[in-house]
Amino acid sequence: MNDITTAELKERQANGTAPVIIDVRETWENEEARIAGSQNIPLGELPSKLDDLEDLKEQEVVVHCKGGGRSASAKAYLTQQGFQNVRNLIGGMQAYQQG
């Protein structure tokens, strides 16, 4: 699945069709700024949270971090674990806050 732009994500949030959003930044980063409706699972904790995310394997999931690097790793990891529709937020939180 192609990655998602901040414009597309914001449009989908506005019209009520937002996907599941997972913030893979550290907890302190999430506390400074967060995308409404997102859940915070720091990248290092993803393996231990897989059981909690099992129901999302068939759903569209957007992962994001500050700039896109950690979420690219999260996307690759989740895809390896059988998640079928993971998208990375292009530009991460930096782009989301600018746009």
Image (tube, rainbow, N blue to C red):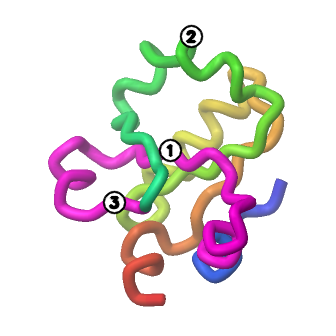
N-terminal label among 3 and 2: 3
Number of the label disc, if any, that sits on residue 34: 3
Residue 80: name its quadrant: top right
For marks 2 and 1, give the CA distance: 15 Å
* Left or right of 79 in this view: 27: left
Q: Is residue 14 magenta?
A: yes
Residue 63 sits above or below residue 96 on the image: above
N-terminal label among 2 and 1: 1
Which percent across, then down, holds residue 62?
62, 51
Q: Residue at 38% of width from left, 80% of height from top?
A: 97
Secondary element at image label 1: strand
Which percent across, then down, holds residue 79?
72, 33
Dot 1 amino acid type? Ile
N-terminal label among 3 and 1: 1
Tell us which disc is closer to us: 3 or 2: 3
How packed mark 1 is, by other alpha carbons closer than 10 Å (few <14, some 14-19, many 20 or more), is many
For marks 3 and 2, give the CA distance: 24 Å
Q: Residue at 46% of width from left, 77% of height from top?
A: 96
- The residue labelled by disc 1 is 22
Q: Residue at 45% of width from left, 26% of height from top?
A: 46
- The residue labelled by disc 2 is 51
- Span colored in magenta: 10-35
Dot 3 amino acid type? Arg
Residue 82 sits above or below residue 35 on the image: above
